[in-house]
Amino acid sequence: MLSINPGLTIWTFIIFLLLLFILGKTAWKPLLASLKTRENAIADSLSRAEQARTDAERLIAENKQERAKAEEEVQKALREGRLYAEQMRRDLVEKAKEEAGRLLAQARAEIEHDTQRALRQLRTEVSDLAIMATSKLLDENMNEERHRKVVDKMIADLSTTAAA
């Protein structure tokens, strides 16, 4: 069945060793050098990737700090804006109160002035009516200045009795 030829086996073994020696001299060294270069390139790539990851983590941490700082500044600006708005509101309310007080005082002064003018006009009319009534009653002609003095005195007397 199966027969092994010892000569063929020896020659096959010798050719295999010779092929192994030739490949070792010509192919294995460049192949090993290529594998070593590739291993170094992969290690370098891994090192750069690790460095990039470290840089990215550092940038993320810096970004978080900057974002927190910006948020703090925004909150500070909002607080200052609220305080400013509140102060402006208080100032406007104070100014409005002052303006209302000034307008009220001005209105009171105008009312007092108009009241005094109306009273003077009323006194003049009352004195004119009194002079006319007196002259008709007495049927004598007194001079107007004297009539006016008499009427003014009567009005003053009436005012003091009315005030009391």
Image (cartoon, helix red, strand yellow):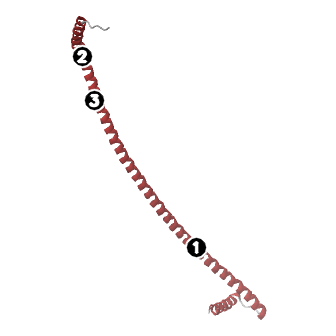
Dot 1 lies on which element? helix
Residue highlighted by disc 3? 43
The three-letter amino acid code for the residue at tag 2 is Trp
* Closest to the observer, 58 or 113: 58
- Which dot, 1 or 3, sits closer to the camera? 3
Question: Of label 1 and label 2, which has the lower sequence position?
Answer: 2
Q: Is residue 139 visible?
A: no
Say whether residue 33 is left or right of residue 134.
left
User: On screen, 24 above or below 43?
Assistant: above
Give the image quarter of residue 121. Answer: bottom right
Q: Who comes first in sequence, dot 1 or dot 3?
A: 3
Task: Report the amino acid beneath label 3.
Answer: Ala
SS assignment at label 2 = helix
Please rate how many residues cluster around mark 3, counting C-alpha atoms within 10 Å: few if below 14, some from 14 to 19, many from 20: few
Residue at point 60% right, 73% down? 107
> What amino acid is at disc 1?
Leu
Residue 129: x and y, percent?
Answer: 74, 86
Q: Say whether residue 127 is left or right of residue 73.
A: right
